[in-house]
């Protein structure tokens, strides 16, 4: 029994140590910008975000707790999902997995890319919500020749992942002062396919989809919660009057 408990403690310590770098990285860097939450109510934004996700993220990152057919909840038909979002010949009911296994990913990339199903929920911190972090992170990449990938990030300094959306945003260099503090300015090296405003809007769409994917039933949960609160309020009045009627003749 003692050996069993000791092994559990060791495993727990290992798990915490594995999580520590992620939690630390999420609080480093600049202050986070606010994610435009109104996009969560825009089905068009969620659909565009889903398309960006499968085109740019689903090559290395999986969403193993989400099925393609769940995207019907954001207004897509099964035919639209099959024609526009599934490129591997899979079925609409399949999980959003990738072909690359974790062993190969670690050998080729140095680390296994994390699953993104719950990434927006897991990245919340003192600076804001997980959506705020992702919105800032995907908009603050800059060229850094000192890094192995050639990229760095202001929200996640020394990030290991390259800038997968660079074709949309273009290449740019962050401007620092003499004390290596970010000045809030960038120098554009090469133009992207989108303007700065268009890119920010596209990132907002992508983050909205990531936020939705972390809890796709959140709107139903909120509506159900309001119904339950209303029911409890009415039931409280009924129970209060029944109680008064029951005890009215008791001296």
Image: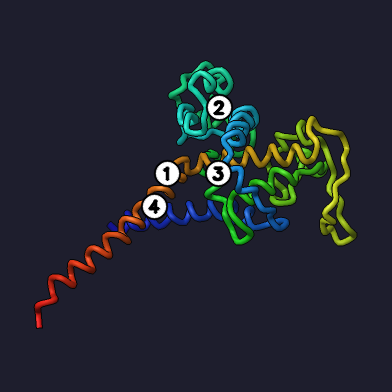
Q: Which of marks 1 and 2 is in front?
A: 1
- For image coordinates 22% across by 65% down, the residue present is 239
Judge the density around disc 3: few (<14), some (14-19), many (≥20) Cα neighbours within 10 Å: many
**Residue 23 x %, y %:** 58, 55
Q: Spatial distance from mark 4 to mark 2, Cα to Cα?
A: 40 Å
Q: In this view, does 186 lie to the left or right of 237?
A: right
**Residue 158 x %, y %:** 72, 48
Q: Spatial distance from mark 4 to mark 3, Cα to Cα?
A: 20 Å
Q: Quickly name the residue at label 2.
A: 100
- For image coordinates 85% across by 51% down, the residue present is 185
* Residue 243 visible in image: yes
Placement of the C terminus among the 4 image quadrants: bottom left
Q: Spatial distance from mark 1 to mark 2, Cα to Cα?
A: 34 Å
Q: Are marks 1 and 4 in contact (CB under 8 Å)?
A: no
Q: Which of marks 4 and 3 is in front?
A: 4
Q: Is mark 1 on a helix, strand or loop?
A: helix
Q: Quickly name the residue at label 3.
A: 211
Q: Quickly name the residue at label 1.
A: 220
Rendered position, 117 above or below 176: above
Q: Quickly name the residue at label 4.
A: 225
Q: Where residue 72 is drawn, which disc sits there?
A: none
- For image coordinates 42% across by 48% down, the residue present is 223
Work out whether mark 1 precedes mark 3 in sequence or the reverse, and give the earlier one.
Answer: 3
State how many labels appear.
Answer: 4
Work out whether mark 3 precedes mark 2 in sequence or the reverse, and give the earlier one.
Answer: 2
């Amino acid at each position: 029994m003692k050996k069993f408990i000791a092994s559990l403690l060791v495993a727990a310590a290992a798990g915490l140590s594995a999580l520590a770098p992620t939690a630390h990285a999420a609080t480093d860097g600049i202050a986070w910008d606010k994610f435009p939450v109104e996009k969560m109510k825009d089905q068009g934004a969620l659909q565009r975000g889903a398309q960006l996700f499968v085109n740019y993220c689903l090559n290395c990152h999986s969403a193993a707790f989400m099925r393609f057919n769940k995207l019907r909840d954001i207004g897509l038909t099964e035919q639209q999902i099959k024609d526009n979002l599934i490129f591997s010949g899979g079925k609409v009911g399949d999980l959003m997995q990738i072909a690359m296994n974790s062993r190969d990913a670690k050998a080729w990339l140095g680390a296994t890319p994390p699953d993104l199903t719950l990434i927006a929920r897991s990245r919340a911190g003192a600076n804001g919500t997980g959506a705020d972090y992702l919105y800032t992170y995907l908009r603050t990449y800059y060229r850094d020749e000192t890094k192995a990938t050639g990229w760095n990030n202001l929200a996640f300094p020394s990030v290991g992942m390259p800038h997968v959306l660079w074709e949309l945003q273009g290449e740019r260099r962050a401007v620092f002062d003499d004390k290596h503090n970010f000045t809030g300015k960038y120098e554009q090296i090469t133009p992207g396919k989108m303007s700065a405003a268009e890119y920010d809007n596209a990132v907002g769409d992508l983050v909205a989809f990531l936020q939705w994917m972390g809890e796709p039933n959140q709107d139903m949960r909120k509506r159900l919660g309001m119904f339950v609160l209303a029911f409890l309020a009415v039931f409280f009045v009924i129970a209060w009057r029944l109680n008064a009627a029951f005890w009215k003749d008791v001296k």
